[in-house]
Image (tube, rainbow, N blue to C red):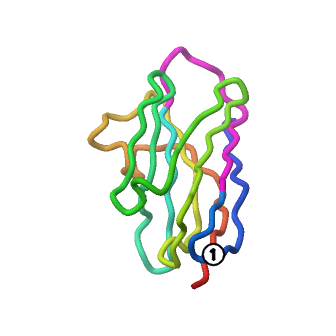
Amino acid sequence: QVQLVESGGDSVQAGGSLRLTCKISGYTNSGYSMGWAWFRQVVGKEREGIAALFTSTGRSFYADSVKGRFTISQDNTKNIVYLQMSSLEPEDTAIYYCAATVPEPFSNYVLAPEMYNHWGQGTQVTVSS
């Protein structure tokens, strides 16, 4: 059974940085490329896709809201994906979720939550002004 576990959420001040980690277990490499993504959600709002990555090529995708501030990366040897967040703003406060799917989704839909079938439990990020 595939499981994703996020960690690294914390409370920080505006302008600060955090690195989130997502580790996948129970996954057997089928030879298809995996798509990883990070989403976030605020109570009462829809889940927002903010970053994604294809394991085959390392190609990454970002939502405009985080472009230039967040970086998604992978460590294939450890089945881990990271989200480095810098220049954090109060508007970044949310629960952050890691997701994965095989094969990787079409690039037009890479930040759509319905494209992913494995999800972590979420980790809280709070940014204070």
Q: In the rendered structure, does residue 26 fall within the stretch colored magenta? A: yes
Residue 95 located left or right of residue 65: right
Residue 126 lies, in percent from the top left, at: 63, 75
Which residue is painted at 71% across and 68% down in the image?
A: 10
Amino acid type shown at disc 1: Thr
Q: Position of residue 21 (x, y in %)?
A: 68, 48
Q: Secondary structure at mark 1?
A: strand
Would you name the residue on which mark 1 appears? Answer: 126
At a point 56% along the width and 38% down the height, the residue shown is 73
Magenta stretch: includes residue 32: yes
Total numbered circles: 1
Q: Residues within 10 Å of mark 1 (few under 14, many from 20)?
A: some
Q: Is residue 101 left or right of residue 108?
A: right
Q: Residue at x 36, y 55 (%)?
A: 63
Name the image quarter holding the N terminus: top right
Residue 14 in the image: state x and y as whole percent: 58, 76
